[in-house]
Image: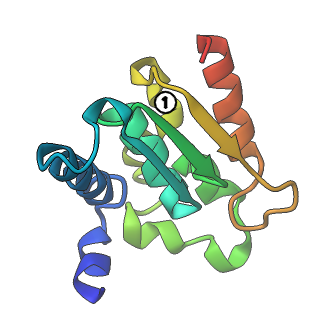
């Protein structure tokens, strides 16, 4: 709802990742899910959360990113005009806050990612360009995932 959307302002890639990880841990702590077999998936912004949870936390055994954002800086530079300033409210001003953009991008934290990841992307996506999935694929392939 509205309070959650407000919490994301300036905190995208932080509170959303904490939220999904807390939910998964809650389910496993209650015996409703197997902690060793937790998986996560999401599309677009949810794909961003998926990749971030896999790269920055050790909660999930696997994940699937559907047209997810792997590199916030690249998205800020590559997306269509309608969405070009959208991330300013979710992360910070670009390019002034580029360091913050990069710190929240899974593409720069593949060294901490070690589980299987399925990347799905459409060739003609105008919102999340295919290079998001392509660069993530190349980084994971180089790592042997």
Q: Quadrant of the N terminus?
A: bottom left
Q: Quadrant of residue 134?
A: top right
The answer, for residue 103, to whether it is visible in the render is: no
Where residue 120 appears, x then y in whole percent? 71, 47
Which residue is depicted at the point 30% across and 55% down? 20
* Residue at far left of view: 30
Q: Quadrant of residue 116?
A: top right
Horizontal side of 45 relative to 59 (left or right) equals: right
Relative to 96, residue 35 above or below: above
Which residue is depicted at the point 44% across and 28% down? 109
Where residue 42 appears, x then y in whole percent? 52, 57
Circle 1 is placed at which residue position? Answer: 108
Taking depth in this image into account, of 64 and 88 the one nearest to the observer is: 64
Which residue is depicted at the point 67% across and 80% down? 82
The answer, for residue 83, to whether it is visible in the render is: yes
Report the number of numbered marks: 1
Q: Secondary structure at mark 1?
A: helix
Relative to 9, residue 49 above or below: above
Relative to 32, residue 113 above or below: above
Horizontal side of 142 relative to 4 (left or right) equals: right
Taking depth in this image into account, of 15 and 35 the one nearest to the observer is: 35
Q: Quadrant of residue 113?
A: top left
Where residue 111 appears, x then y in whole percent? 44, 18
Q: Quadrant of the C terminus?
A: top right
């Amino acid at each position: 709802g509205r309070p959650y959307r407000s919490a994301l302002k300036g905190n995208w890639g932080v509170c959303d990742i904490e939220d999904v990880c807390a939910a998964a841990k809650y389910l496993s702590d209650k015996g409703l899910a197997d902690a060793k077999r937790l998986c996560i998936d999401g599309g677009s912004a949810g794909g961003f959360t998926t990749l971030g949870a896999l790269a920055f936390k050790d909660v999930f055994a696997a994940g699937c990113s559907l047209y997810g954002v792997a590199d916030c800086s690249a998205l800020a530079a590559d997306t269509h005009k309608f969405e070009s300033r959208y991330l300013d409210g979710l992360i910070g001003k670009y390019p002034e806050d580029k360091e913050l953009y990069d710190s929240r991008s899974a593409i720069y934290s593949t060294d901490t990612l070690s589980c299987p990841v399925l990347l799905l992307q459409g060739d003609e996506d105008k919102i999340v360009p295919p290079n998001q999935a392509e660069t993530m694929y190349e980084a994971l392939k180089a790592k042997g995932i």
